[in-house]
Amino acid sequence: MRNTLLKEAVSVLGSVLDALRASITATGEDAADLHYAIGDLSASASARLISGAAADDLSNCFDLATAAGATLDTMRTVRETVQDMSPSGKPGLIVQTFSVRLALVQEAAILFASTLSSRDEVESLQDRFNTAFEAAENTAADAMETETYRTLVELHAAVTRFLSTLSYTLPRIVKVTYPKSFPALTLAQRLYQDAGRASELIAENKPMHPAFMPAALRALSE
């Protein structure tokens, strides 16, 4: 591997690791394991890229990021950050493509462990995953990576089944309008006969203060 190509691949790998580091905010043992693994891979990135060991080490870093609390949104940011890179050499492109696939696998894993609250959220996620998987599948097909393509298609199908099944069990988001502003507790009692669901209304509408909810608001239909 020529030195210039190696340097570019190391740079791409470093950016991926930086994005993974930024994907978590937690502290503790899982976070410490991630930071250690990132530091260890960064310290010998050139040697591991040359030997081929970087692939397993990078995959481990992605696993550790999820274990340390990376969310659907932060792992999506990792994937999109990597997609926006523009390496010109083959080694850098390989690191980029591999990292995008790893991020997508982790997004699916995080999704399967997530609790979703509405059909609208499910539909938004389905659109997001369809776009991401179709791009990854096309890349694999263009490179004639048959096994990788098949694996991506199977995971894409699993995500679609999961979201479709979940959608039937969830309420929709509806728009509700009142003549004036009410506190979240009052609205929760009026809408659901349960003041304990005020937090749902607050999360969905993000008022300046829970005592002054917007007169036109979004709420779950059930």
Image: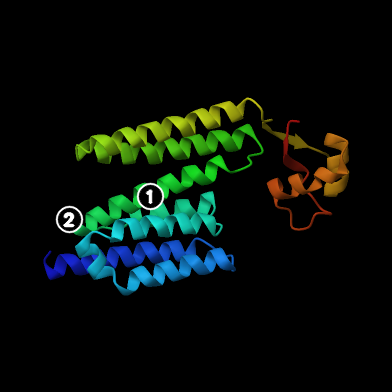
| Residue hosting label 1 | 102
Q: Is residue 144 left or right of residue 183?
A: left
From the viewer's perspective, tell me whether residue 33 is left or right of residue 87.
Answer: right
Instruction: Name the spot of residue 56 as percent of width and height, x first.
Output: 33, 56
Way the structure is coloured: rainbow
Point 48% across, 30% down: residue: 160
* 179 over 106 or under it: above or below: above
Q: Position of residue 8 (x, y in %)?
A: 22, 66
Tell me if mark 1 has few (under 14), some (14-19) or many (20+) residues whose alpha carbon lies within 10 angstroms of its own. Answer: some
Residue 35: image location, x then y, percent: 47, 69
Name the quarter where the N terminus is drawn: bottom left
Query: How many callouts does the rendering have?
Result: 2
| In this picture, residue 207 sits left or right of residue 187 | left
| Residue occupying image coordinates x 59% and y 65% | 26
Residue 196, numbered label: none
Q: Is residue 182 visible?
A: no
* Mark 2 residue crowding within 10 angstroms, few (<14) / some (14–19) / many (20+): some
The CA span between labels 1 and 2 is 18 Å
What type is the residue that disc 1 sits on? Leu
Amino acid type for the residue under numbered disc 2:
Lys
Residue 82 in sight in this render: yes
Residue bearing mark 2: 90
Which of the 4 quarters of the picture holds residue 173? Answer: top right
71, 56: nearer the viewer: 56
SS at mark 2 in the image? helix
Reply above or below: 110 against 120.
below
Indicate which label's residue lies in the foreground, 1 or 2: 1
In primary-sequence order, the first of circles 1 and 2 is: 2
Image location (x, y in percent) of residue 58? 36, 59
Considering the image in quadrants, where does the C terminus appear? top right
Look at the numbered disc 1 and give the secondary structure of its residue. helix
Q: Locate residue 158 relative to residue 140 in the image: left or right.
A: right
